[in-house]
Image (spheres, helix red, strand yellow):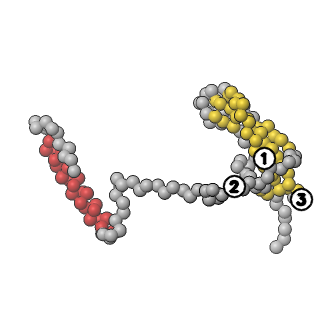
Amino acid sequence: MTPLACANPTCPHREHIKTLEGALALTRQELAELRAKVWGRKHLPPAVSEEVPPVAPKKRGAPVGHPGWFRKTPTRMDETIEVTLTRCPHCGSRALTEDPDVEEHVQEDIVVPQVQVTKFRRHHYRCRGCGAGVAGVGPEELPGSEPPRPKGRGIPTRA
């Protein structure tokens, strides 16, 4: 432990700093004894200053080198919805500049007794207020949905 005392031999706080350093050393020793008593000598918890390296999350999908698998995009679109914005969802500014990039998201909904296919064309914008790149979400759009998902349709039944 490095002493925190002043380098100046005439410092008026020199004695006080030495007293505090002694109290700190005593407190650390008591803490170590309490940890050993609670956790046992072999199973001491990691010290506060030690950082446990984060574990990398497992990669999703097929193993490396295997071909990916995706559903085929339907050839028939029942509805196409243009998703546009008038305000920045981050800061509320109306100063939006539309990017030439338009993202298409095809969503298949299972509507009894058929599948309804909707293409959402999301227009991308750059907000001049906060600088964020933004895009909207269409009505009833399930972002990131690839396989068809059943929409909530309650059918009353009797037990």
Residue annotated with mark 3: 113
SS for dot 3: loop
One can see residue 78 in this view: yes
Write the residue at 24% across / 60% down.
Answer: 29
Above or below, comparing residue 153 to residue 84 in the picture: below
**In contact (CB < 8 Å): disc 3 and disc 2:** no
Closer-to-camera residue (135/57): 57
Question: Residue 22: percent from the left, percent from the top?
Answer: 18, 52
Residue found at the far left of this picture = 10
Eye-nearest disc, 3 or 2 = 2
Mark 1 nearby-residue class (10 Å; few <14, some 14–19, many ≥20): many
Label 3 to label 1, Cα distance in Å? 20 Å
Q: Amino acid at mark 2?
A: Gly
Left or right: where does residue 61 sit relative to residue 4? right
Write the residue at 78% across / 42% down.
Answer: 120
Residue 57 occupies quadrant: bottom right
Residue annotated with mark 1: 106
